[in-house]
Amino acid sequence: MNHTAVMHGPAPAGHPAGADPETHPEASSAAPADGPAGPPDPARHLASPRLRSAMLVQQEALAAARDHLRGLGFVELLPPLLGPVTDPGGRGAKALDVDYYGRRYKLMTSAILYKQASLHGFPKLFYIAPNVRVEPPETAGTGRHLVEFHQIDVEIAGASREDAMEIAAGLLRHVVEHVVDRVPHELAALGRDPGFFSALRSAPFDRLPHAEAVARLWDDGRAQNPDAEIDWAGEEALSRAADRPFFITDYPKGSRGFYDREDPERPGSLRNFDLIAHGGFGELVSGSEREADYATIVTRMRESGENPAKYAWYLDAAREGLPRSAGFGMGLQRLVRFLTGLDALWQVTAYPKLPGVIAP
Amino acid sequence: MTAAHREGTGPGPLGAAGFPEDEVRARARAGTAAVFPPVDAYGNALFGAGSGTSGAYAPSADALDRARLVPPVFMPQRLEKLVELGREPVYDDVDLRTRVGGFASSLPLFLSAFGSTRAGSGDLALAASVQAGRLGIPMVLGENMVPVHGYATPADGTLPALTARIRAYADASDGTSGGVVVQQSTEDADAEVWNLLYSDPALRPLVDSGRLAFELKIGQGAKPGLGGMTVVDRDAADRLSDAFAVRDVFGASAPARLRCATPGTFTEEIVRQQVRFMRNNFPRARVWVKLPPGRDVALAARTAWRAGADAVTVDGAEGGTGWAPRAFLDQVGLPLAECLRRIGPPEGCLLVTGRFHEGGRTVRALALGARAAGLGRAALLAVDEDPEHGLVRLAESIALECRLLVSALGKYAPAALTAEDVWWPDGPAATAYAPATDTGTSSYASATDTGTSRFTPPTDTGTSPYASATDSAIPAGAAPGRPSLPQRVGGPA
């Protein structure tokens, strides 16, 4: 199958017999009715040539990311897995509770709070962070959500949003160059044409303010809530229309976490960004300038319906003074899916857990 | 008490005629426990305005209970209906079906939240859920049910209260009418109740049929400015002390403790952003907002609607509760009529709660801008009377009264009702629409308030749109107070 032809959406069921055992309907388990066909049983999935190629691409992507960031002076830390609180996130995903010596702890949905708290000692840091988000079942059909996933999680003290955007773009370019250069045969085996990346390699990434993105979608007949995230279908449409990745900036307050800094010049608008891949692959990166002021953080917590009391350790750090910073998280599985051109995240994940599906 | 008193050798007990002596003596005996209704009534009694001072019910302080519906003689809308039907319209031509907070509803009624109190989360609440499902009216589930009762099904197979009520409602419903609305308090937010429900595959049918809503509870009528309160025993107090403030206001030796949820901090921007956050995070769920009868209720309602709330519920000060300090039951918050007056013609779907139990108050509230009225205490009393059919029969009786009253006004749908259908014995000065103000402080002058003037009806030139000038000749209080429900109900001790 030519995977470049179908970037996203429900995985096609009509593969030639024997050509692609992982998407055979009879091999699929517990897939939601309106979502892509799910993974086959773990043994068959883990033995498939396609997964092997994808993992070799992932290995090169990780090596390239580490090499690039270390070259820029970043230090890699290992992230925490549990905490009394975690990134409250958004879009209906739930953190997973863990009984921790009788207390309710959370598995990390992202380690953003720890990144900020680490900046005094590590002004340029990154994690390759495992995260868990119990996504709503409706995301099972996007091809872009897994309950367990990893992020290349970057934070930079003293940086502006634009600094973080530049580093995110440079990181993506470097990873693409490295993968195309080092494992072209794996990409070829997966049907990925390197020409897909030519505009990415040669032209700068555009910037599209959120309000403009919403207006563009409205003009295209796609209703969007101007106060919220762009919906999955809208984001995919924008992504399909592009020939290289681009940034969406200035998301409205109320769509993102309390740690994204509100623009002092434009109240209600956040100093943040997403990096959207072209070709229908959608968001690869979310990032922002961070809020560092204690009173503003507490107020923003209330605005996002959070209970400040449970963030005691983080607020103590904020009272003592968090460095100003900017940073981002690049979804590793999304990156690999983008590199390989496969249909769904489970195909680039050794041990996938689809939203709403009970899996081993 | 002095030593001489104790030995019975001193003078007789002190008297203070005309002073609330019994009240002071009760406080002297019971201390902080006297701030609350008797603790042994907890779980068996439902509280609200009138239950603060004594066991007997007090006349309602809400002008809505003194107002009257005033049918006209000439009825152009009846003529329209006559033409449409080709025969004289009758009361059962009134169509009570409506949209309530984004849901279809068979009646302009919904089941209000009961919360996590014992009266509100046991078998009665389950029976009410089943019957609300049968009726096809929305059901609101109160806050704090997950932190108190849990969510996941324990090993013994018993369903936690929230799950049991949702399942009972869904099983009894026709799958299209009504919907389930779940509140989330600060403590619920710690338990991520909304995320929990939204990501639960078992609730997908409700989400897919557009019949799940989340309600941001900003406050309630019975205790504006306070959070939820329940009485718990000591064991439960220990278990809950991580999530809630637990206080021994009933005395250190008493077996009971007061469990308090925080009321939460709200500003205009916090409400706006929380509503937006809900819409962002749960795009397929409806968003409801419940307001206490605060003096800035008009601004709060408008803020919620403009942020995209599908419904704003205003709980009048006469709203019921499982438990509240006595001072709050009778002395705090605006009566519902005043809330409606301050809000004026609503910008979005307005729902009302507090003391609704029959058709008259319901139709008056609908005429003053409400889309539907919530049944709280009335629903619990009804299922206590008959767990199988009590609420259905109560709702049917209210529906019949509504049809009779609406048709008598020459109208055939609740949406056709207007403020001129209501007459105020207290006179127009007290009942004119107050222009909403952006400052949150009370100001009835509207001349300079250009930002809000569009909420004042164009005919409002100083006289009340609710009543004609001649109405002011009628002395205040001329209409008798409406009969009230007894506050105590039977039930398991």
Image (spheres, coloured by chain):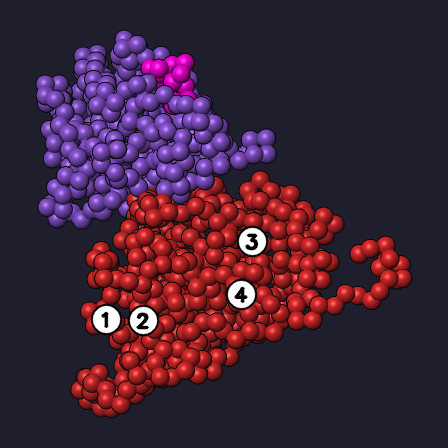
Chain colours: A purple, B red
Closer mark to the observer between disc 2 and disc 4: 2
What range of the chain is rendered magenta?
A114-126
Residue at position x 37%, y 47% in the image: B267
Residue B124, compared with residue A316, is above or below; it is below
Judging by the rendered image, the residue that carries numbered circle 1 is: B460
Residue B432, which numbered label?
A: 2
Element type at mark 1: loop
The residues tagged by marks 2 and 4 sit, at their Cα atoms, a distance apart of 24 Å
The chain carrying label 1 is B
Residue at position x 25%, y 31% in the image: A271
2 and 4 marks in contact (CB < 8 Å): no
Same chain, labels 1 and 3? yes
Same chain, labels 2 and 4? yes
Residue B330, which numbered label?
A: 4
The residues tagged by marks 4 and 1 sit, at their Cα atoms, a distance apart of 33 Å
1 and 3 marks in contact (CB < 8 Å): no
2 and 1 marks in contact (CB < 8 Å): yes
| Image quadrant in which you'd find residue B315 | bottom left
The residues tagged by marks 2 and 3 sit, at their Cα atoms, a distance apart of 35 Å
| Residue kind at label 2, given as amino acid type | Ala
Q: Earlier in the sequence, mark 2 or mark 4?
A: 4
Element type at mark 2: loop
Judging by the rendered image, the residue that carries numbered circle 3 is: B229
